[in-house]
Amino acid sequence: MGLSKKDLSRRRANFKAKLDELEQKTKFDPLKRNSALWDEIALLKKKMAED
């Protein structure tokens, strides 16, 4: 059984909120020294593309 429209929109909103929070942190890390932060952003973008 799949997710409902409400569940999908909530999930997407949570991804966007988390992505916005992480992108604010990356403004202070332009040289990508914190690779875990950048990897998490890439993973979130990939998950959002799948939905």
Image (cartoon, grey):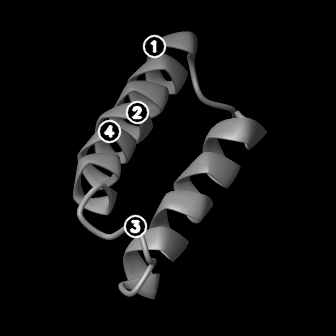
| Amino acid type of the residue tagged 1 in the rendering | Lys
Q: In this rendered view, identify the residue nearer to me: 25 or 7.
A: 25
Q: Are marks 3 and 1 in contact (CB under 8 Å)?
A: no
Q: CA distance from mark 2 to mark 3?
A: 21 Å
Which badge, 3 or 1, is on the more N-terminal residue?
1
Using a 10 Å C-alpha cutoff, classify the residue at mark 1 as few (fewer than 14 neighbours), some (14 to 19) or many (20 or more): few
Q: CA distance from mark 1 to mark 2?
A: 15 Å
The residue wearing badge 3 is: 30
| Amino acid type of the residue tagged 2 in the rendering | Lys
Q: CA distance from mark 3 to mark 4?
A: 16 Å
Callout in the foreground (2, 3): 3
- Picture coordinates of residue 24, whole percent (x, y): 25, 48
Q: Residue at x 39, y 87 (%)?
A: 33
Quarter holding residue 30: bottom left
Which quadrant, please, contains the C terminus? top right
Which badge, 4 or 1, is on the more N-terminal residue?
1
- Picture coordinates of residue 37, whole percent (x, y): 38, 73
The residue wearing badge 1 is: 6
Q: CA distance from mark 4 to mark 1?
A: 21 Å
- Picture coordinates of residue 12, whole percent (x, y): 48, 29
Q: CA distance from mark 3 to mark 1?
A: 36 Å
Mark linked to residue 26: none
Q: In this rendered view, identify the residue nearer to me: 51 or 26.
A: 26
Q: Residue at x 54, y 53 (%)?
A: 44
Which badge, 1 or 2, is on the more N-terminal residue?
1
Which badge, 3 or 4, is on the more N-terminal residue?
4
Q: Is label 2 in a helix, a strand or a loop?
A: helix
25 lies above or below 21: below
Q: Is label 3 in a helix, a strand or a loop?
A: loop
Q: Residue at x 46, y 85 (%)?
A: 35
Mark linked to residue 16: 2
Mark linked to residue 20: 4
